[in-house]
Image (tube, rainbow, N blue to C red):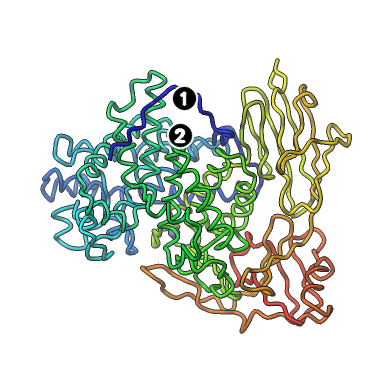
Amino acid sequence: MRVQLKDNEERKKYKQMWELTKLKDVKVTDKYFDEALHIDVKNMLLLDPDRLLAGFRETACILAGDDEETTSAFMKRKQRYGGEWEDKLIGGHTMGHYLTALAQTAVSPAVTGKELEDVKIRLDYMLVSLKECQEKIKGTENEGFIFGAGFPTKEFRDNPLLQFENVEKGLSHPFLEAWVPWYTMHKILTGLNASFKYYGSEIALEIANALGIWIAKRTEGWTEDKHKKVLSIEYGGMNDCLYELYEINRNLKDKGNSLYSKEYERFADAAHAFDETELFERILSGKADLLNNVHANTTIPKFIGALARYEAFNSEKKYLEYAESFWDLVVNKHTYVTGGNSENEHFGQDNVLDAERTNVNNETCNTYNMLKLSRRLFAVTGKKKYLDYSARTLINAIMASQNHETGFTTYFQPMATGYHKVFNTLDGNFWCCTGTGYENFTKLQRGIFYKGDEKLLISLYIASEYVSDDYVVTMDCDFTKSDKVNIRIKPAAGKVIADDFWLRIPTWSRAIPSVRLNGKEKELKQNEGFLIVSKEDIAGGAELEMCIPFGITCENLPDGKNTYAFLYGPYVLSARLGAKKIMTKPHGIAVVASAGRSVDNDEISIVSEKSVEDFVGNIDKYLIKRDGEAEFDLIGTSKPLVFTTHFDQYTESYGIYWKLKV
Ligand SMILES: [Zn+2]
């Protein structure tokens, strides 16, 4: 299983085409986005850290052979949170998300003062506590292991590694045998990596490296049969987080930093044990319906892991092909207008989307993961399609997943017309999407800017500020009010701007955007979907005013020729359908789904035109924006509807897709 890919000089010369700018260098100033961050942080700080740690502490005590009283004291007399997730076999997954979200917050320039102080205290406390758990079993056969799952029976309490053993036997009953321990481990290790990468915590790296060795040992002991069985049960992106840990250590070694683990090459071998090449090859074959009935959130991270292998060993070009093919398949054949995918957590047949619009579409973790994949694919390939998808998904799936008043987030986002969004509660629903939800709003500045060699790319038009050593970029825009983007570029004292500025031409722009440079119309070069402002023109600083012409656009579904969604520029619109039918019902394992449907059907009869094509072609006449508001009146049909920006719908039932007929 050895990787046999050695560090070499060629690898050291490799540079990504673009790099995501650092979280600490970008501050989102858009009011809505900024509020979304702060309410998210508020909720995270309301959680009891000792309850999130309870499972980790109990596990460590059991493995150390502590008596009941010692265990209870070490647990600070606290119990795991309930709700069937944190107190059952998937317990502890929230810890991973929590670490990642706190680490991202701790470096966000939008967080300051007491809030920042509280976040750092919390993150430090979590890490020190996890380290204490790890220290407790140092020198034992389980050295390095940390885990926080619940113990549904005495058997599990007696042997906290039982889930891992059961997975190796192919046993996967989520309550009786194993939920998804490697998925949980992926979240934990990713959180530790993030705490080192963003926040610089050396304790986090120490824990991650010790845990990495435990994981490596486990994978090295697998027979072919065990290996197969493990890969048959959801394991998240174990390849992704282990390649990441490998790279962290390799970079430290390259820099002569003694913090690196001397055994770091084992992490790449362990990562490779989670590369499911059989699946990767199948996707590459391009056959029909490859994703039919495939669990979406199990599968997407596997391909992020494939990309991670390419990022770590850029000679592994095949792995980039795997990730690109998968992305194409998901985005082109399985994705709704918001950027979301899946029905009841699964992909369907190729291009069957209209027929699968229900109350349980678009698991939020999937868009979280697709965004991760897209941004990293752009960084290595420079292909604009990855940015176009990211822009759409951030606004219409991620921003749309939060209740803007409570900060709580969705599991599903129904695509069937007439349902509503259901949100988690503070301490009752520790779903997978609750965890990715915490993360989502602490990294809203990611992907706005990318840095390349002597160039800066503006990918997302969101009011924000980017500060580098050489200059400051301040961007203002709000497409609900205006079609203009104002960009001010100011060199640092004694510097000149030595970067070209690349501006993404949005897919929804009706023509090439016009740009005024310091008040004068400027003809710009274009390259593969970007406008380029050359450094010579902005050397001493500049004011750019970009005008993006846009209006209403209509998008149908591959299997629903007349089933349309409407967009206003970047925003997916949804009809306001009132709050009278807000009802929920249990779904899956302690998840909650929308139950009451506010409309009998989603048909709209056109009375103003002779055909659907004519209506759609003249949509500007029939979906009319109210002055100064993000509200749109649909006229010329049998149903007078009021639409608004979908991201801002969280109190009413809604309708994105409508079947048009004459
Ligand atoms: Zn989820």
Look at the image and tell me whether residue 460 can be seen: yes
Q: Nearer the viewer, residue 120 or 357?
A: 357
Quarter that holds the N terminus: top left
Above or below: residue 337 compared with residue 25: below
Badge 1 or badge 2: first in the primary sequence? 1
* Residue nearest the viewer, comparing 223 with 588: 223
Relative to residue 380, is residue 44 drawn left or right?
left
Q: Residues within 10 Å of mark 2 (few under 14, many from 20)?
A: some
Looking at the image, in which quadrant does ligand 1 appear? bottom left
Residue 133 visible in the snapshot: no
Find numbered disc 1 in the image and state the secondary structure of the residue it sits on: helix
Q: Is residue 599 above or below residue 253?
A: below
Q: Is residue 310 left or right of residue 416?
A: left
User: Residue at image x 64%, y 73%?
Assistant: 560
Specify whether 121 is left or right of 388. Answer: left
Q: Nearer the viewer, residue 194 or 358?
A: 358
Q: Identity of the amino acid at label 1?
A: Glu
Q: CA distance from mark 1 to mark 2?
A: 9 Å
Q: Where's residue 154, x and y in %?
A: 14, 61
Residue that sits furthest to the bottom in the current view: 600
Residue displayed at 36% across by 34% down? 246
- Crowding at dot 1, Cα within 10 Å, few <14 / some 14-19 / many 20+, comes out as few
**Residue drawn at (44%, 38%) of the image:** 316
Taking the spot 17% from the left edge, 39% from the top edge, the residue there is: 137
Whether the residue carrying mark 2 lies under 8 Å from ligand 1 is answered with no
| Dot 2 amino acid type | Ser
Residue 8: x and y in percent read 41, 24
Provide the residue designation for mark 2: 315
- Provide the residue designation for mark 1: 10
Q: Residue 412 bears which disc, if any?
A: none
Q: Are marks 1 and 2 in contact (CB under 8 Å)?
A: yes
